[in-house]
Image: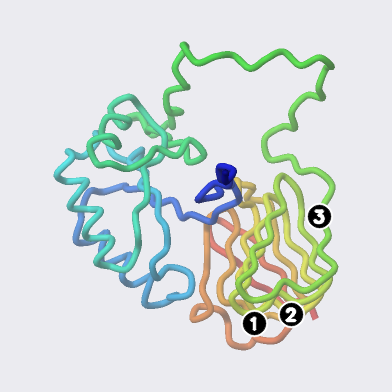
Amino acid sequence: MSLPNYEPAGELKIGQVGIANLKIRTLDIPALAEEMRQRVTRAPKMFDRAAVILDFGGLSSLPSASQARELVEALRGAGALPVGLAYGSSENDALAVELGLPLLAKFRAQYERADGAAVDAAPPPASAKPAAKPDKPRAAPAASGAVEPGLMQVASVRSGQQLYAEQRDLTVVGTVGAGAEVIADGSIHIYGALRGRALAGAQGMEAARIFCREFHAELVAIAGTYMVADDFPRELKGRAVQIRLEKGKLDIAALD
């Protein structure tokens, strides 16, 4: 008699996933599609068939289901792949159900009042079970924007790899290869060449910076503000640089 096979047909793991958040500020579907098409054209390695979360928090009211479907199809036609909605209000939840898309709580929408102030999305339902009380006291959570001691990567980051330093700085002793991606909630220090993508301040830390010894990047970003290779100053190619966010724009300056 053969024993039953208890091996699962599929193994599910939860990991760090790079997903872009598109905050809709004007429900102009042709304009949104054209903007996305231009992003894909200028940086295909970053945006072509990129997973995108739709965030309707910048609108005064949610779009109808038919408008949202039209937007999803327009963005797909432009080269992006909308995969969910940012976590928001109960109406937003209902819209996600109607569209057959998930809500991603990590991408929490902020709904703006008429006076321009931001209002956080509704908290999880009160019926949710509270977390079990820990046996031992835990350290208080770090303040917003604070980072832990840095993560050090001694080996180079090869093409196709992604390295993420959560709530801390990242130091790469070697090279970040073309097609590789390094992400940190703090700053990024690269002692070799940067040939791939570097995204610092991933959770919104605008004071984060990127340093590298040899600048050949495909894309750099700080707190969501990005710049692609076509926009880099040509005279800085191959040089040691520092990248920071200055008045809402990326500033790239030589260090040597």
For the C terminus, the quadrant is: bottom right
Residue 94 in picture, x, y percent from top left? 27, 29
Per the image, label 1 sits on a secondary structure element best described as loop
The kind of residue tagged 1 is His
* Contact? badges 3 and 1 (CB < 8 Å): no
Residue 27 in the figure: left or right of residue 83: left
As drawn, 173 above or below 1: below
From the viewer's side, name the closer residue of 18 and 228: 18
Q: Please name the amino acid that badge 2 sits on.
A: Ala
Question: Based on the displayed image, in which of its 4 quarters is residue 190 positioned?
Answer: bottom right
Q: Residue 186's x, y, as percent?
A: 71, 51
Name the residue that disc number 2 marks: 193
Asked if residue 148 lies left or right of residue 96, the reply is right
Q: CA gap, disc 2 to disc 3?
A: 18 Å
**Which residue is found at the position 31% from the left and 70% from the top?**
37
Q: Sequence order check: which comes first, mark 2 or mark 1?
A: 2
Which mark is in front, 2 or 3?
3
Residue at point 53%, 55% (across, down): 224
Is label 2 in contact with label 1 (beta carbons under 8 Å)?
Answer: yes
Q: Where, by quadrant of the figure, is residue 163 drawn?
A: bottom right
Q: Which residue is mark 3?
A: 151
Q: Position of residue 181 (x, y in %)?
A: 62, 67
User: In the figure, is residue 212 to the left or right of 149?
Assistant: left
Q: Secondary structure at mark 2?
A: strand
Q: Which mark is residue 30?
A: none
Judged from this view, the residue extending furthest toward the left is: 66
Residue at the spot of label 1: 216
Amino acid at circle 3: Leu
